[in-house]
Amino acid sequence: MKTTNNGRRSLLKKLAASATGVFGLGFLAKAGEGLSTPEKQVGNVTKDQEIPLFSGHTKHGNLVFVAGKGAHFDGDVAAHTKHVLDELEKELKSAGSSLEKVLKVNVYLADLADYDKMNAAYRGRFGNKPPVRTTVATYGGVPGDSLVEMDCIAYV
């Protein structure tokens, strides 16, 4: 008896379906129901010579990934941190989210000596349940001469 690939797949699916019922693994079958790859949505695309360079944010499913925001003006790290957080907030709102829905923040400092001053300006901006955070000092500085840059991941 010759079996085609489609015949084997069909037989395997039937066996797996009966095994999940017999062994009480129906939750595995249900877990995969309705799952598909969500469409990626982008916002605020930055272009370089008519070729998209990067997006201000990307949505994938119910997650929002916000590109790094910096402060490109003269000022101290407190002013730069406030500006960067304001820019993150604007980007999150345009994506249908908010600072209160941020899960993860990456902070890049031009100088680790600014850590305490950055924290003072950062504190309280994400509500009473702040996100997880990674803070690093960059070698060679932050692009655009910003004293601080931040990116984040949130949900909608």
Image: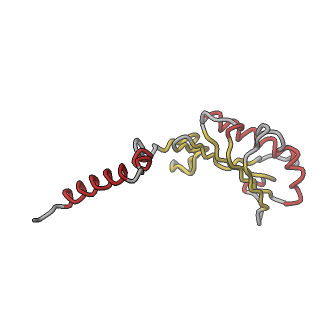
Figure quadrant of residue 139: bottom right
Q: Nearer the viewer, residue 56 or 151?
A: 151
Q: Which of 89 and 11 is in front in this view?
A: 11
Q: Is residue 5 above or below residue 126?
A: below
Q: Which residue lies furthest to the front in this view?
A: 22
Residue 142 picture location, percent across and down = 75, 57
Identify the coloring: secondary structure
Task: Please name whichever residue, 71 or 23, is drawn nearer the observer in this view of the structure.
Answer: 23
Percent across and percent down for residue 138 are 76, 62
Furthest residue toward left: 1
Q: Which of 89 and 18 is in front in this view?
A: 18
Q: Which residue is drawn at 76% across and 39% down?
A: 126
The image position of residue 84, as x and y in percent, is 76, 44
The quarter in which the C terminus is drawn is top right
29 lies left or right of 108: left
Q: Position of residue 12 (x, y in %)?
A: 27, 57
Residue 76's place in the image compared with 125, above or below, is: below
Q: In this view, does 136 lie above or below 149?
A: below
Task: Tell me where residue 123 sits by quadrant.
Answer: top right
